[in-house]
Image (cartoon, rainbow, N blue to C red):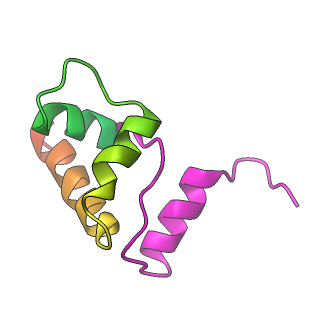
Amino acid sequence: MDIPGLGPWTVDVYYMMALRRANVWPQGDLALASALQDIKQLEARPTRDEQLVFAEQWKPWRAVAARMLWMHYLDARGQ
């Protein structure tokens, strides 16, 4: 059954936050893409597929890496 507004990103974040799964990467997250661009000094934000390549190295703790990147994203913007 399809539910409007619920896609892969929503499911991934639910797995991370509600179910506390450690090996989940929120696919296509723009804040993560921006943080990766900043940290890896990339010319452009990485695509969804490029993000998954980066995230492979953080298995089985991809959700932890995502949280750290979100914190970098917020800190870099003074939030």
Residue 70 picture location, percent across and down = 25, 52
Q: Is residue 77 left or right of residue 67?
A: left
Q: Quadrant of the N terminus?
A: bottom right
Residue 43 in the image: state x and y as whole percent.
20, 18
Can you say whether 44 is above or below 11 in the image? above
The relative height of residue 13 versus residue 21 in the rendered view (above or below) is above
As rendered, which of 45 and 71 lies closer to the eye?
45
Q: How many circles with numbers are drawn on the protein?
A: 0
Q: Quadrant of residue 23?
A: bottom left
Q: Is residue 50 left or right of residue 2?
A: left
Which residue is drawn at the image coordinates 57% and 56% (left, top)? 10
Percent x, y for residue 22? 36, 76
Question: On the rendered image, what quadrant is the C terminus found in?
Answer: top left
Q: Position of residue 46 (x, y in %)?
A: 33, 30
The residue under the point 40% across, 47% down is: 52
Magenta residues? 1-30
State whether residue 29 is above or below residue 42.
below
Q: How would you classify the magenta stretch by its main secondary structure?
A: loop
**Residue at x-position 28% and y-position 47%:** 54
Residue furthest to the right in view is 1
Residue drawn at x 13%, y 36% as measured from the top left: 40
Residue 3 left/right relative to 54 = right
Of 3 and 48, which appears nearest the observer? Answer: 48
Query: Residue farthest to the top?
Result: 43
Q: Is 40 one of the magenta-colored residues?
A: no
Task: Locate residue 61 relative to residue 30 in the image: left or right.
Answer: left
Residue 25, compared with residue 15, is above or below; it is: above
